[in-house]
Amino acid sequence: MKPFNVILVAMFTLFTVLTYAQYPTSATSNEIKVKAENLTTEYSKYLALTGVQIPLFKGVVEEYMKKSEKAIEELEGRQELDILVELQARETLRMNDILTQPQYRLYKQLKTKLQPIKVIEK
């Protein structure tokens, strides 16, 4: 093998390893995907999401679920609650780009029931 080919193969292998290291597929990631899929299905019952809206909606839900899980793992108390409120507000605003206005109004009403910020156990 020529030295150039060896370097090229080594660079490709290194790039591939680094890419997978940054985006691990863990059980938690798969659980979040399933939860996002289920939540999207539940919303779709009320919002009548179109074929174009469903993957966009699911993507936003999944993205913010991951961010929320990270906040819950890393933060506590008031700081955690503040971040969760902020994330929920951002997610709601992102849905405005995906949903029609009637869907968006209904989504905001449903969100508090289907996606509470945090459940406090007594």
Image: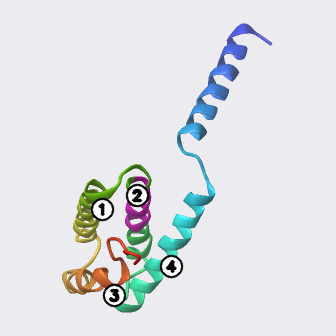
Marks 4 and 2, the one that precedes in the sequence: 4
Residue 38 in picture, x, y percent from top left: 50, 79
Q: Residues within 10 Å of mark 4 (few under 14, many from 20)?
A: few
Q: Is residue 68 above or below residue 22?
A: below
Amino acid type at circle 2 is Ile
Task: Find the magenta span and give its range.
Answer: 59-70
Amino acid type at circle 1 is Leu
**Helix, strand or loop for the magenta stretch, by majority:** helix
Q: CA distance from mark 1 to mark 2?
A: 8 Å
The residue tagged 4 is: 38
Label 2's element? helix
Marks 1 and 2, the one that precedes in the sequence: 2
The residue tagged 2 is: 72
Label 1's element? helix
Q: CA distance from mark 1 to mark 4?
A: 20 Å
Q: Residues within 10 Å of mark 2 (few under 14, many from 20)?
A: some
The residue tagged 3 is: 47
Amino acid type at circle 4 is Asn
Residue drawn at x 60%, y 40% as measured from the top left: 20
Rendered image quadrant of residue 71: bottom left
